[in-house]
Amino acid sequence: MSHTAYQLLEVVGTSPLSSDDAIRSGIEKATQAHHKIDWFQVVETRGQVRDGKVTQFQVIMKVGMRLDSQPSVSAI
């Protein structure tokens, strides 16, 4: 049986189009720096309003990165 461990990152994705686009934008940027992202969880959704119109969607996410097991190094 394999055991997996994850490291959590907090990512804020933004978009002028939609909260779904903000999620995709945040995940795409995060995967540029961290290549082992497996999942995300939306923690908060908010936005910016100017002159009575929504101008930006902001989505705060927890992002799970898989931690690899390092093979044990034997002493020489």
Image (cartoon, grey):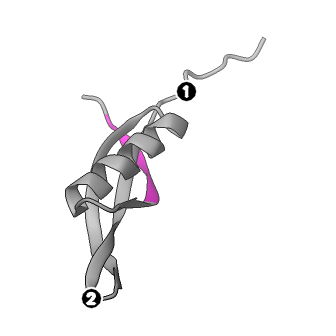
Q: Are marks 2 and 1 in contact (CB under 8 Å)?
A: no
Q: Quadrant of the N terminus?
A: top left
Spot occupied by residue 43 in the image (x, y as percentages of width and height): 29, 70
Amino acid type indicated by mark 1: Gln
The span shown in magenta is 3-10
Q: Secondary structure at mark 1?
A: loop
Q: Is residue 9 left or right of residue 18?
A: right
9 within the magenta span: yes
Q: Please, what is the dominant secondary structure of the magenta stretch?
A: strand
Q: How many marks?
A: 2
- State the residue at coordinates (32%, 36%): 3
Q: Is residue 60 above or below residue 26?
A: below
Residue 52 sits in quarter: bottom left
Amino acid bearing label 2: Gly
Q: Point out the image quarter for the C terminus.
A: top right
- In the depicted view, which residue is nearer to us: 59 or 43? 59
Q: Which residue is mark 2?
A: 52
Q: Is residue 45 left or right of residue 14?
A: left
The residue under label 1 is: 70
Name the residue at 26% across, 64% down: 42
Residue at x 59%, y 23% (from the top left corner):
72
Q: Could you tell me which secondary element the residue under label 2 belongs to?
A: loop
